[in-house]
Image (cartoon, rainbow, N blue to C red):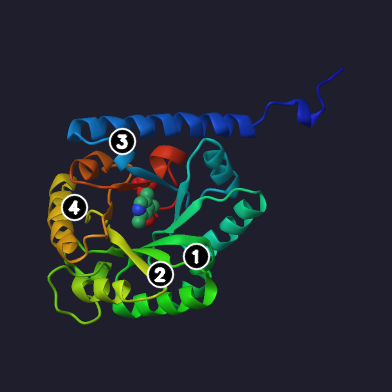
Protein backbone atom coordinates (compact mmCIF):
# COMPACT_ATOMS: atom_id res chain seq x y z
CA UNK A 1 0.00 0.00 0.00
CA UNK A 2 1.23 3.48 -0.82
CA UNK A 3 0.61 6.22 1.67
CA UNK A 4 -2.20 8.22 0.08
CA UNK A 5 -4.34 8.95 3.09
CA UNK A 6 -3.81 12.62 3.85
CA UNK A 7 -5.21 12.28 7.34
CA UNK A 8 -2.48 9.78 8.17
CA UNK A 9 0.30 12.29 7.60
CA UNK A 10 1.52 14.25 10.58
CA UNK A 11 1.63 17.48 8.56
CA UNK A 12 1.76 20.99 9.99
CA UNK A 13 -0.99 20.08 12.40
CA UNK A 14 -2.51 21.43 15.56
CA UNK A 15 -0.26 19.45 17.87
CA UNK A 16 2.89 20.98 16.38
CA UNK A 17 1.55 24.49 16.72
CA UNK A 18 0.28 23.82 20.22
CA UNK A 19 3.72 22.57 21.22
CA UNK A 20 5.32 25.64 19.66
CA UNK A 21 2.98 27.96 21.58
CA UNK A 22 3.51 26.03 24.80
CA UNK A 23 7.28 26.44 24.38
CA UNK A 24 6.92 30.16 23.63
CA UNK A 25 4.67 30.57 26.65
CA UNK A 26 7.14 28.77 28.93
CA UNK A 27 9.97 31.03 27.71
CA UNK A 28 7.97 34.22 28.21
CA UNK A 29 6.70 33.13 31.62
CA UNK A 30 10.23 32.40 32.78
CA UNK A 31 11.44 35.79 31.50
CA UNK A 32 8.61 37.46 33.44
CA UNK A 33 9.42 35.43 36.57
CA UNK A 34 13.13 36.31 36.34
CA UNK A 35 12.38 40.00 35.80
CA UNK A 36 10.00 40.02 38.78
CA UNK A 37 12.57 38.27 40.97
CA UNK A 38 15.25 40.78 39.93
CA UNK A 39 12.90 43.64 40.76
CA UNK A 40 11.83 42.14 44.09
CA UNK A 41 8.27 41.78 42.88
CA UNK A 42 5.91 38.78 42.93
CA UNK A 43 5.10 37.42 39.46
CA UNK A 44 1.44 37.50 40.41
CA UNK A 45 1.75 41.30 40.09
CA UNK A 46 2.32 41.08 36.34
CA UNK A 47 -0.33 40.02 33.82
CA UNK A 48 0.79 38.86 30.41
CA UNK A 49 -1.42 39.98 27.55
CA UNK A 50 -0.86 37.73 24.52
CA UNK A 51 -0.88 39.97 21.45
CA UNK A 52 -2.48 37.76 18.82
CA UNK A 53 -2.71 40.28 15.95
CA UNK A 54 -2.05 38.68 12.54
CA UNK A 55 -2.43 35.20 14.09
CA UNK A 56 -5.58 33.07 13.68
CA UNK A 57 -8.37 32.27 16.12
CA UNK A 58 -6.96 28.74 16.39
CA UNK A 59 -3.87 30.20 18.08
CA UNK A 60 -6.05 32.13 20.54
CA UNK A 61 -7.88 28.90 21.36
CA UNK A 62 -4.62 27.04 21.82
CA UNK A 63 -3.29 29.76 24.14
CA UNK A 64 -6.56 29.76 26.09
CA UNK A 65 -6.18 25.99 26.44
CA UNK A 66 -2.70 26.61 27.86
CA UNK A 67 -4.16 28.92 30.51
CA UNK A 68 -3.71 32.34 28.93
CA UNK A 69 -6.65 34.59 29.84
CA UNK A 70 -5.73 37.99 28.40
CA UNK A 71 -5.43 38.55 24.63
CA UNK A 72 -4.59 41.78 22.80
CA UNK A 73 -5.50 43.00 19.32
CA UNK A 74 -4.78 46.30 17.59
CA UNK A 75 -7.23 46.47 14.66
CA UNK A 76 -10.98 46.26 15.04
CA UNK A 77 -11.58 44.76 11.64
CA UNK A 78 -9.37 41.79 12.42
CA UNK A 79 -10.26 41.53 16.12
CA UNK A 80 -14.05 41.55 15.76
CA UNK A 81 -14.11 38.49 13.53
CA UNK A 82 -11.49 36.67 15.55
CA UNK A 83 -13.30 37.34 18.84
CA UNK A 84 -16.55 36.01 17.34
CA UNK A 85 -14.80 32.88 16.12
CA UNK A 86 -13.21 32.30 19.52
CA UNK A 87 -16.52 32.82 21.32
CA UNK A 88 -18.29 30.43 18.94
CA UNK A 89 -15.68 27.81 19.85
CA UNK A 90 -16.64 28.21 23.51
CA UNK A 91 -13.66 30.17 24.85
CA UNK A 92 -14.03 33.47 26.70
CA UNK A 93 -10.69 35.28 26.93
CA UNK A 94 -10.46 38.85 28.17
CA UNK A 95 -9.82 40.94 25.05
CA UNK A 96 -7.68 44.06 25.32
CA UNK A 97 -7.84 46.56 22.49
CA UNK A 98 -4.33 48.01 22.23
CA UNK A 99 -4.26 49.83 18.89
CA UNK A 100 -5.06 53.26 17.63
CA UNK A 101 -8.84 53.51 17.80
CA UNK A 102 -11.06 55.58 15.54
CA UNK A 103 -14.20 56.96 17.09
CA UNK A 104 -16.42 55.25 14.51
CA UNK A 105 -15.03 51.84 15.62
CA UNK A 106 -16.02 52.23 19.28
CA UNK A 107 -19.41 50.60 18.80
CA UNK A 108 -17.78 47.49 17.43
CA UNK A 109 -14.92 47.36 19.96
CA UNK A 110 -17.14 47.53 23.07
CA UNK A 111 -18.92 44.37 21.94
CA UNK A 112 -15.88 42.15 22.52
CA UNK A 113 -13.23 44.17 24.38
CA UNK A 114 -13.32 44.33 28.18
CA UNK A 115 -10.27 46.58 28.25
CA UNK A 116 -9.28 49.42 25.93
CA UNK A 117 -5.64 50.38 26.50
CA UNK A 118 -5.35 53.09 23.89
CA UNK A 119 -7.60 55.99 24.88
CA UNK A 120 -5.61 59.17 24.32
CA UNK A 121 -8.09 62.00 23.82
CA UNK A 122 -11.19 63.41 25.46
CA UNK A 123 -13.14 63.04 22.21
CA UNK A 124 -12.27 59.35 22.00
CA UNK A 125 -13.18 58.83 25.68
CA UNK A 126 -16.60 60.39 25.06
CA UNK A 127 -17.24 58.26 21.96
CA UNK A 128 -16.21 55.11 23.81
CA UNK A 129 -18.46 56.02 26.74
CA UNK A 130 -21.49 56.52 24.49
CA UNK A 131 -20.77 53.19 22.77
CA UNK A 132 -20.27 51.36 26.07
CA UNK A 133 -23.50 52.69 27.60
CA UNK A 134 -25.45 51.64 24.52
CA UNK A 135 -23.74 48.37 23.73
CA UNK A 136 -22.84 46.55 26.94
CA UNK A 137 -24.03 46.03 30.49
CA UNK A 138 -20.69 46.58 32.25
CA UNK A 139 -18.24 49.47 31.98
CA UNK A 140 -15.16 49.09 29.80
CA UNK A 141 -11.85 49.18 31.67
CA UNK A 142 -9.76 51.97 30.19
CA UNK A 143 -6.03 52.56 30.30
CA UNK A 144 -5.08 56.01 29.11
CA UNK A 145 -2.27 55.74 26.60
CA UNK A 146 0.44 58.27 27.39
CA UNK A 147 3.18 59.64 25.23
CA UNK A 148 6.58 59.20 26.85
CA UNK A 149 8.39 61.60 24.52
CA UNK A 150 5.47 64.07 24.15
CA UNK A 151 5.69 63.79 20.35
CA UNK A 152 2.13 64.74 19.36
CA UNK A 153 2.37 62.99 15.98
CA UNK A 154 2.56 59.49 17.43
CA UNK A 155 -0.45 59.44 19.71
CA UNK A 156 -0.71 59.20 23.45
CA UNK A 157 -2.06 61.72 25.92
CA UNK A 158 0.45 64.38 26.93
CA UNK A 159 1.61 64.38 30.57
CA UNK A 160 1.82 67.82 32.11
CA UNK A 161 -0.06 69.41 29.23
CA UNK A 162 -3.11 71.63 29.68
CA UNK A 163 -4.38 70.69 26.21
CA UNK A 164 -8.16 70.25 26.65
CA UNK A 165 -8.34 67.23 24.31
CA UNK A 166 -4.95 65.52 24.58
CA UNK A 167 -3.61 66.56 28.00
CA UNK A 168 -3.30 63.56 30.33
CA UNK A 169 -5.24 65.31 33.09
CA UNK A 170 -8.13 66.10 30.76
CA UNK A 171 -8.28 62.58 29.30
CA UNK A 172 -8.09 60.91 32.72
CA UNK A 173 -10.79 63.23 34.04
CA UNK A 174 -13.07 62.45 31.10
CA UNK A 175 -12.63 58.70 31.60
CA UNK A 176 -13.06 58.90 35.38
CA UNK A 177 -16.28 60.86 34.95
CA UNK A 178 -17.80 58.56 32.33
CA UNK A 179 -20.46 56.12 33.54
CA UNK A 180 -19.65 53.62 30.79
CA UNK A 181 -15.91 53.58 31.50
CA UNK A 182 -13.73 52.63 34.45
CA UNK A 183 -10.36 54.35 34.72
CA UNK A 184 -7.92 51.50 35.35
CA UNK A 185 -4.48 53.00 34.68
CA UNK A 186 -1.96 53.94 32.03
CA UNK A 187 -0.41 52.34 28.94
CA UNK A 188 2.65 53.33 26.96
CA UNK A 189 4.98 52.16 24.22
CA UNK A 190 8.68 53.03 24.47
CA UNK A 191 9.41 55.63 21.78
CA UNK A 192 11.56 54.52 18.87
CA UNK A 193 15.18 55.30 19.53
CA UNK A 194 14.78 55.54 23.31
CA UNK A 195 16.63 53.16 25.51
CA UNK A 196 13.87 51.12 27.29
CA UNK A 197 15.26 51.76 30.80
CA UNK A 198 15.11 55.49 30.21
CA UNK A 199 11.65 55.35 28.65
CA UNK A 200 10.12 53.27 31.43
CA UNK A 201 11.84 55.23 34.19
CA UNK A 202 10.20 58.34 32.73
CA UNK A 203 6.87 56.48 32.51
CA UNK A 204 7.16 55.47 36.18
CA UNK A 205 7.40 59.15 37.14
CA UNK A 206 4.32 59.95 35.06
CA UNK A 207 2.45 57.02 36.63
CA UNK A 208 3.36 58.12 40.15
CA UNK A 209 2.01 61.63 39.58
CA UNK A 210 -1.08 60.18 37.87
CA UNK A 211 -1.85 57.87 40.81
CA UNK A 212 -1.70 60.77 43.23
CA UNK A 213 -4.81 62.08 41.44
CA UNK A 214 -6.36 58.67 40.67
CA UNK A 215 -5.25 56.26 43.40
CA UNK A 216 -7.55 53.47 42.26
CA UNK A 217 -6.13 53.41 38.72
CA UNK A 218 -3.10 51.23 39.40
CA UNK A 219 -2.62 49.33 36.13
CA UNK A 220 0.52 50.14 34.16
CA UNK A 221 0.75 48.46 30.76
CA UNK A 222 4.28 48.71 29.43
CA UNK A 223 6.76 46.37 27.82
CA UNK A 224 6.59 44.12 24.79
CA UNK A 225 8.67 41.15 23.56
CA UNK A 226 11.87 43.16 23.36
CA UNK A 227 11.71 45.23 26.52
CA UNK A 228 9.47 43.53 29.06
CA UNK A 229 12.30 43.19 31.62
CA UNK A 230 12.88 46.95 31.71
CA UNK A 231 9.15 47.57 32.01
CA UNK A 232 8.75 45.15 34.92
CA UNK A 233 11.72 46.75 36.65
CA UNK A 234 9.89 50.09 36.43
CA UNK A 235 6.55 48.86 37.74
CA UNK A 236 4.60 47.41 34.80
CA UNK A 237 1.53 45.44 35.89
CA UNK A 238 0.76 44.33 32.31
CA UNK A 239 3.16 43.33 29.55
CA UNK A 240 1.92 42.97 25.97
CA UNK A 241 3.75 40.12 24.29
CA UNK A 242 3.35 39.13 20.65
CA UNK A 243 6.33 37.86 18.72
CA UNK A 244 8.18 36.23 21.65
CA UNK A 245 5.09 34.08 22.19
CA UNK A 246 3.61 33.48 18.74
CA UNK A 247 6.58 34.02 16.41
CA UNK A 248 7.74 36.88 14.23
CA UNK A 249 5.00 38.59 12.24
CA UNK A 250 5.57 39.06 8.53
CA UNK A 251 4.30 42.63 8.68
CA UNK A 252 5.55 45.43 10.87
CA UNK A 253 2.67 45.86 13.26
C1 LIG B 1 2.11 44.57 18.40
C2 LIG B 1 2.06 45.25 19.70
C3 LIG B 1 2.66 44.69 20.83
C4 LIG B 1 3.43 43.37 20.81
O1 LIG B 1 4.67 43.56 20.19
P1 LIG B 1 5.78 42.39 20.18
O2 LIG B 1 7.04 43.14 19.94
O3 LIG B 1 5.42 41.47 19.08
O4 LIG B 1 5.74 41.72 21.50
C5 LIG B 1 2.55 45.37 22.04
N1 LIG B 1 1.89 46.54 22.12
C6 LIG B 1 1.30 47.11 21.05
C7 LIG B 1 0.59 48.41 21.24
C8 LIG B 1 1.37 46.50 19.81
O5 LIG B 1 0.79 47.07 18.75
Answer whether labels 2 and 1 touch (C-beta < 8 Å).
Answer: yes
Q: Going from the N terminus, do you reach mark 4 or mark 1 first? A: 1
Quadrant for residue 151, please give it.
bottom left
Task: Check disc 3: other Cα within 10 Å, few if <14, some if 14-19, many if 20+.
Answer: some
User: Residue, x 19% and y 33% (percent of image)?
Assistant: 40
Q: Horizontal placement of 150 versus 128: left or right?
A: left
The location of residue 173, given as percent across then percent down, is: 25, 75
Give the structural element (helix, strand or loop) at label 4: loop
Which residue is farthest top?
A: 1
The location of residue 146, given as percent across then percent down, is: 24, 64
Where the N terminus falls, by quadrant? top right
**Residue marked by disc 1:** 76
Q: Nearer the viewer, residue 76 or 138?
A: 138
**Residue marked by disc 3:** 43
Q: Going from the N terminus, do you reach mark 1 or mark 3 first? A: 3
Give the structural element (helix, strand or loop) at label 1: helix
Answer whether labels 4 and 1 touch (C-beta < 8 Å).
Answer: no
- Whole-angstrom CA distance, mark 1 to mark 3, is 31 Å
Q: Going from the N terminus, do you reach mark 2 or mark 4 first? A: 2
**Residue 174 higher or lower than 144, as above or below:** below
Give the structural element (helix, strand or loop) at label 3: helix
- Whole-angstrom CA distance, mark 2 to mark 4, is 24 Å
**Residue marked by disc 2:** 101
- Whole-angstrom CA distance, mark 4 to mark 1, is 28 Å
Amino acid sequence: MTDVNPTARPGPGRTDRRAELAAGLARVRSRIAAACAAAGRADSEVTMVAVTKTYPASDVLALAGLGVVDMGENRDQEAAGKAAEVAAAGAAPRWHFIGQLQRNKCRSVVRYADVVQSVDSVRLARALDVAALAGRDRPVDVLVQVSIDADPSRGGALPGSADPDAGLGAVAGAVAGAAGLRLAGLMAVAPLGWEPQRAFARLAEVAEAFRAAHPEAVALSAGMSGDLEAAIRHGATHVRVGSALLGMRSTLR
